[in-house]
Image (cartoon, rainbow, N blue to C red):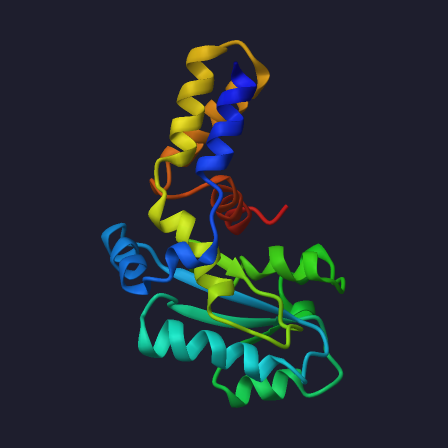
Amino acid sequence: MVGEIVDKWFVQNTFTSSEFADLRKLVESKERQNLRISVGLPTLNEEATIRRVIRAIRSRLMDRIPLVDEIAVIDSDSDDQTRDIAREEGVPVHVLGDLLPEYGARRGKGEALWKSLHVLTGDIVAWIDTDVTSAHPKFVYGLLGPLLAVDEAMEELGACLARLAPGAPLAKLVSGVIRRTAEFQPSDDVAVVAMRRLDTDPR
């Protein structure tokens, strides 16, 4: 029974980017919830693609439609022109080794993701790969759409599981996630809660 409900929930809450192509609706949802959105771009020697990625995001999701409030590069000590190109495009660049040095400096995407939370200011943070040759705004709004437009999805799942199997570990886990989420914004999901915890305690 629980398995059927979980399966149904995943079917109902699995999305494609095309479902959120109406960007003005996403902006309305963002403004209604008083949220700020950041996009982090982890880089390591991406001079061939970084300019295209930045322009794809900025032209459609910042200049034309104010969906994204902040964009920044988090660079893993590139030895090509990646950082220079990003700065030419007017994007702030943060070198990984300079972020939270008290926790050590390591190369790698995972390190760039969690340390970026120290400098990005959004209530919701989306990270986009910068080595893609076919950069498209849908990479961003496809991630943001469910967080902005499907506010109650996690709450519904947690409530169902808690009613059906209040003593089950999964029900406790999801219910606990919902309670923690309620302390932040109604549209937050597990990832956003984790981001905010890391933002205050990088350990």
Q: Considering only vertical position in the picture, is 182 above or below 118?
A: above
- Residue 151 percent location from the top left of the image: 35, 41
On the picture, is 146 further left or further right than 128?
left
In this rendering, does residue 179 appear at all? no
Which residue lies at the image location 34% right of the left edge and 48% below the top edge?
Answer: 149
Name the foreground residue: 93 vs 172. 172
On the picture, is 91 further left or further right than 77?
left
Name the foreground residue: 108 vs 162. 162
- Residue 120 percent location from the top left of the image: 48, 63
Q: Considering only vertical position in the picture, is 113 above or below 76?
A: above
On the picture, is 187 further left or further right than 5?
left
What is the total number of numbered labels drawn onto the structure image?
0
Give residue 85's quadrant in the image.
bottom right
Name the foreground residue: 65 vs 68. 65
Q: Considering only vertical position in the picture, is 201 above or below 89?
A: above
- The image quadrant where one finds the C terminus is top right
